[in-house]
Image (cartoon, grey):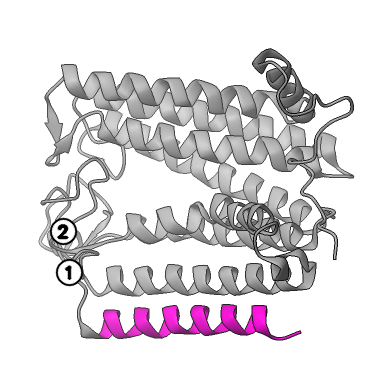
Amino acid sequence: MTILRLPWLRPGPGAPPPGTPEKKRRADLRSRTHTWHRPSAVAAAALAVVALLCVAAMVLDQRTLGGAPLWAKPFKFAVSGALYFATWSWLVSLLPRFRRTAAGLTNLLVLIFAAEYVLLVFQAARGRASHFNVETPQDAAIFGTMAAMIAVLWVATLVLTVLVLFTKVPDRASRWAVRTGAVLSLVGISLGQLMTNPTAQQLAQWKSGGRPSMVGGHTVGLEDGGPGLPILGWSTVGGDLRIPHFVGMHALQALPLLAIALVALAPRFPRLRDDVVRVRLVLIGAAGYAGLIALVTWQALRAQPLVHPDAATLGAFAVLAAGVGLGSWAAVRVR
């Protein structure tokens, strides 16, 4: 079978043949991406630059917050935002209908994220926590504003996800990668809601007549701020709800990349030239990714650190890996 090339890999009209100067190659790349949503593409590029600035800030400013470098959180948000907006910039360009609506919603996402990021950096510069912090009226107002922004961002992402579900990408495997990736990404964003629930310690403080300085948290079983992984900050002594939030949110990049990888490997592996085989593998990958999100969520809720899984977690992971492996083998072997 012939390969159905992905639309974002297909050379544009008048694409230069191999061996042409690099300048012409860059011009060809621009011709293939000129339909991408420009504001979100600019936002992705700007956040990539901001991420580099955050690295410099971590080197120059040695302050810490909750045991982590003060500028680690702005760095993580910048990297995640850059990936998020680069992906949506491309996805909006694929929509055959409702592109103007999708563009408007994506513009809204850019504005909301920019405002939220400004507040996050403002709190970091003050040496204050941006999330869950209600210690002072100003802190509470900032956290409340960010929570409202996140709610609007979730609704806009939900509408965009629905639009993507009805998008017909020429390559069927890529179509399912986009659809499942968008849905799982929305699930990942939704899992952030788990971090807003008051902890047992905070509830006990309220019952005793006190007023906690933080409401909610990402560490399960312990207070936020203990030992964590470098840069990521994920707890190494307790469960961490940021992990399923992160893993789920970036399904939007992982699954389309799987589809791209399958097309790239097709010249070397003839079975991958069959679009039915690639669809099967993408769907198995999506099921495995959904299982991974469920697994790390279950692990975090049991107050178990990612780097110290118990026998139950390891057993569940082994079953998941075996299922994905056997399913992939069957997908390639069965005609």
| Element class at badge 2 | loop
Instruction: Report if residue 192 is visible in the image.
Output: no
Task: From the viewer's side, name the closer residue of 212 and 173.
Answer: 173
Q: Cα distance, mark 2 to mark 1?
A: 8 Å
| Residue ID for mark 2 | 236
Instruction: Report if residue 303 is visible in the image.
Output: yes
| Place of residue 132 in the rendered image (x, y in percent of width and height, measured from the top left) | 29, 45
Q: Is residue 95 left or right of residue 242?
A: right
Q: Residue at x 78, y 67 (%)?
A: 275
Magenta segment, which residues? 312-335
Type of amino acid at the residue the image marks with label 1 = His
The label shown at residue 308 is 1
* Badge 2 density bin: few <14, some 14–19, many ≥20, Cα 10 Å: some
Q: Is residue 169 left or right of residue 125?
A: right
Name the quadrant of the N terminus: bottom right
| Place of residue 185 in the rendered image (x, y in percent of width and height, measured from the top left) | 55, 56
